[in-house]
Image (cartoon, rainbow, N blue to C red):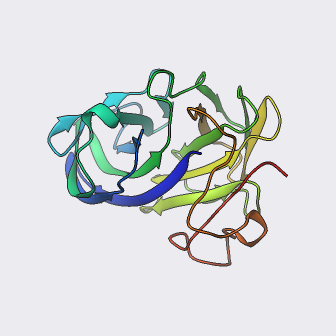
Amino acid sequence: MPTIGNYATGTGGSYFSFSHTINGGSNRLLMFSVHAGANSLGGSVCSGVTYNGTPMTLLPGSSVTHDYARAATYYMLESQLPSAGSYTVGVSTTGDIWRTLGGTNCFSNVSQTVPFGTVSSTKGYQYLSVSTSVGDTIFSYATNGGNLDFEIWPTPPNLELWRIDYGAYNWLVTGYIVATTSPETIYYSGDYDLSVVGVAIKPPSGISLTKNGVSPSNALKYNGIEKNDIVKISGIE
């Protein structure tokens, strides 16, 4: 069953780096989501991401532009990942950069042949319908280029992984849900003018996702437990 491991985040300018401690396990997937904020409209782009010195791959269809911001997701599969331990994420950008920010998530027990479904994206709405199979883990992120805060819908089944608020015009939030219908919907609240991206992460087999022992009814809440506290979803209710 797909398992969510550690996450880490960082911020900076045209280049920044931070450390991510990757879990052990089998059939792992490392994902990195980045927001590049510019001083001018459309004036920034992420030009490359590395983990432990190895380039990560841009997820096709994951790049979105929102006013002064651009966001995208990169990934790396088991064959390129190092053993469990702490390694450096390096992020390079080009253009009229103001601020950049991003974070990593590690998953285990992910299909290595077809790890993703079709990437879905939308702009200007608080929700996104994602093509999926029941039991898939849907990974989502939202960004905006405006001055309003937002968050993933603050009650289960939509669960926040991490968020970065790096001042006005620089927001990035990631979350996930275990699909119980097809298609499944990710919801965000707050700013009505968002760019939202979502994709199903495919398990080799099985239909459940776990994170160290907490049931969905006791999982992450916006004004409840902290985001790095332990979250678990098991099975399909």
Q: Is residue 45 visible?
A: no
x, y percent for residue 226: 56, 76
- Left or right for 126, reference 98: right
Q: Is residue 70 left or right of residue 160?
A: left
- Image side of residue 57 versus residue 192, left or right: left
Nearer to me, 120 or 53: 53
Above/below status of 159 relative to 218: above
Q: Quadrant of residue 214?
A: bottom right
Quadrant of the rendering where the N terminus is positioned: top right
Q: Nearer the viewer, residue 157 or 209?
A: 209
Residue depicted at x 69% and y 68%: 219
Task: Give the residue drawn at x 27%, y 43%.
Answer: 97
- Residue occupying image coordinates x 40% and y 43%: 26
Q: Position of residue 30 (x, y in %)?
A: 38, 43
Count of numbered circles in the view: 0
**Residue 222 location (% of width, % of height):** 67, 70
Looking at the image, residue 76 lies above or below residue 12? above
Q: x, y percentage for residue 136?
A: 66, 37
**Picture quadrant where residue 233 is located:** bottom right
**Quarter residue 126 falls in:** top right
The image shows residue 170, relative to residue 203, as above or below, that is below
113 on left or right of 235? left
Whether residue 142 is visible, yes or no, is yes
Q: Nearer the viewer, residue 123 or 8?
A: 8
